[in-house]
Image (cartoon, rainbow, N blue to C red):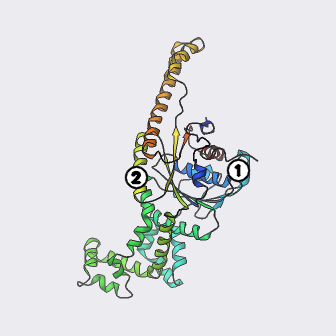
Amino acid sequence: MKSADKATAGAFPPDEVGLRDVLRDRRMCICVGTGGVGKTTSAAAIAIGLAADGRRVALVTIDPSRRLAGALGLSELSNEPQLLSSEHLAPVGIALRGEVWAMVLDPKRTFDELITRLAPDERARERVFANHIYRELSGAVGGSHEFTAIAKLYELDRDGGYDAIVLDTPPARNALEFVRAPQRLMQFFDVPALRLLLAPAGFGARVASHAAAPALALLRRLVGVDLLTEIALFFGAVGGSISGFRERARAVEALLHDPATVCVLVSSPRGEAVRESLSFARALRDADLPLGALIVNRVHEEPARAADLDAVEAALVPALGARLSRQVSASLADSQRRAQRDQIGIGRLRAELGDLPLTVVAQIDGPVGDLEMLGAVARRLFGEPVQAP
C-alpha cells in the first residue's frame, strides 16, 4: 500500500507556513538527520517538488547506494549531474515546469578534478597524483566526503546554472562534520606545523633534523620520520593549490550561513531517532546554521479507534470464525499502539521544535523504489505540487 498518497496527518492549514513557503526564496536546501529515517527519499522528493514549481534543481547525494538512482528512473548516478528524463516522469503523473539534475558525490573523482583545476601546471599535477598520501586520501571513503562536498558545492554554486541545490548529507553522526568542514579546512591550513611543511624549500631537511621546530618534533614522534617525510612531500606537491582550497572553504562557509540557505531536519517518530534529531537540532542552532523545517517520515496512521475493536471482532466472526477474528482484532490493536507511539514521538519533537514548520509523511510499505512513490512523497511535502498536465 502506497500510503503516502493518502497521508493527511500533519497537513498545513491554509494560514500556516508549509515546506513550499520555507523553500520559496531559498537557493540551497540541506537535508540533515540520522540514518534510516528517509532522508535521501525526502531530498529527492524536495527536488521534484521544487522542479514542479518551475525551478532548475541540482540534487546531490553523498549516499553511494544505487537505490536513489533506481527511484529516479536512472540506471546509475555519477559525479556529474544527470537530467531526469521527461519520458520517465510523464507516465507516473509527474509534470515538472523546471528540471531535476541528480548526481552522487564521487570523492576520488572530485579530488582529481579539483587538483587538475588548481594545480599551477602539468608537472605539479602529476606530482600530486603520484604521491602516496594523495592516493590513499583521495581513495578513502571515510573522511573525504566532507572535503569533496565542499569542492562540489563550490562548483555548483559558482556555475550559476541552478535555481536551487538540494543536498542529501550523511547520517546525523557525520552530518555536523560536513557543515563544520569548511571552517576546519581553513583552520587546518593555518596550523604551525603545516606552515613549516609548506615552506618554499627544505621541508625534507626540516623533518629529519634534530633541531626541528617543536610542532614538527611532536609530529615526528607520533608518526615517524618516513611517514612525516611523505606527508611533507605531499604538501609540497599541493602547495600551489592551497590558496584554491582556502578560497573554496571560505566560499562554502559563507554559503552555509547565507540567508538563501536552509537546513531541513528529517526524522522518524521512533524513540532513538527523536532523541538524535533533537540533539542534532540543538547542535545546528548552536552553530548558528539555519534550521527551517522538520519532516517526520514513516508515521503509522491509526486504522481504527480503540472503542471499535470489539465491534470489528464481533462483526468478523460470522465470516472468519472466532480464532481468525481475534487475530485481526489483535493486529488492529497493534497498529493502534504503533500509531499512538508515533504520536508521542511527534509530540516530543513539537514540544522542543514547535517553532519549526512540520510535515508528517505516513508509513510506506517497503522502500521508496520508483518515481511514482517519490511523486507521492513530494505531493505530501508540498501540498500537491506534482500533477499530470
Residue for point 41% across, 47% down: 278
Labels 2 and 1 touching (C-beta < 8 A): no
Q: Classify mark 1: helix, strand or loop.
A: helix
Is residue 278 or residue 170 the one in the foreground?
278
Whole-percent x and y of residue 195? 36, 80
Q: Which residue is mark 2?
A: 282
Whole-percent x and y of residue 240? 46, 82
Cα–Cα span, label 2 and label 1:
38 Å
Seen from this angle, which residue lies furthest left? 210
Q: Is there any visible trace of residue 304 in the rendered image?
A: yes
Whether 27 is drawn above or below 275: the answer is below
Residue type marked 1: Leu
Left or right: 129 with respect to 15? left
Left or right: 25 with respect to 200? right
Seen from this angle, which residue lies furthest top? 318
Q: How many marks?
A: 2
Residue count near mark 2 (Cα–Cα under 10 Å), binned few <14, some 14–19, many ≥20: some
Q: Which residue is mark 1?
A: 89
Is residue 176 or residue 8 the one in the foreground?
8
Is residue 150 or residue 212 the one in the foreground?
150
Residue for point 46% across, 59% down: 289
Residue for point 54% across, 72% down: 113
Mark in front: 2 vs 1: 2
Residue type marked 2: Arg
Left or right: 333 with respect to 7? left
Whole-percent x and y of residue 319? 60, 13
Whether 173 is drawn above or below 335: the answer is below
Is residue 122 or residue 336 the one in the foreground?
336
Question: In what quadrant of the picture does the N terminus appear?
Answer: top right
Q: Classify mark 2: helix, strand or loop.
A: helix
Q: Is there any visible trace of residue 109 in the rendered image?
A: no
